[in-house]
Image: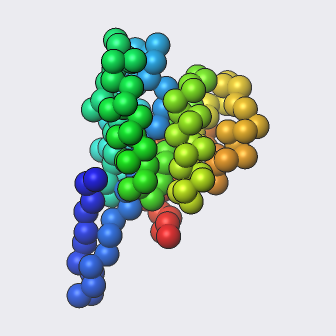
Amino acid sequence: MISKFQVKENKIVKEKTVYLSGAMLDCTDAECRDWREFAKENIKGVSLDPMIRDYRGNPMDGMVDMVENDKADIDGCDVVLINFVKPSVGTSMEVLYGWERGKKIILVAPTEVSVSPWLVYHSHKVFHAIEEAVAYINETKFE
């Protein structure tokens, strides 16, 4: 796991770590990467991007690597940021996995997208734009 620490007033302070969750299977490169690049450039802290394990061409070939490493990244994060533009089994699994481990779940769901009550229930905060969610993450102290 990657983590960053800052020194403030002679104290070491861990920066927040954010896991970037969202649909990948049957998505274009732009759908997968554009919002993640925005988040990585604008989140004050560490961003964990599962696109480093891009098995869209052969998802079953990378199943163990993908799932175990995604779970390890979620274990090591403070916040799971979900960009929900279309239903995704993997994203839903990541949300529940994070929720059950006490991670803060921040959901971005555009107004035109139908969202399951299960997903909203397991989210601590819901936004309609990635920019709003990133600003909230930057302004909020998560413990």
- Identified at 70% across, 31% down, the residue is 115
* Labels in figure, total: 0
Front residue of 45/51: it is 51
Image spot of residue 49 (x, y percent): 34, 39
- Identified at 66% across, 25% down, the residue is 113
Horizontal side of residue 2 vs 94, given as left or right: left
Image spot of residue 22 (x, y percent): 48, 32
Work out which residue is located at the far bottom of the displayed protein and give it. 10
Image spot of residue 91 (x, y percent): 53, 33
Image spot of residue 6 (x, y percent): 25, 72
Front residue of 105/67: it is 67
Q: How is the image coloured?
A: rainbow
- Identified at 49% across, 48% down, the residue is 80
- Identified at 32% across, 32% down, the residue is 65
Work out which residue is located at the far front of the displayed protein and give it. 64
Work out whether residue 102 can be spotted: yes
Work out whether residue 85 can be spotted: no
Position of 111 relative to 15 (above/below): above
Horizontal side of residue 2 vs 87, given as left or right: left
Position of 82 relative to 98 (above/below): above
Position of 57 relative to 44 (above/below): above
The part of the image, by quadrant, that contains residue 10 is bottom left
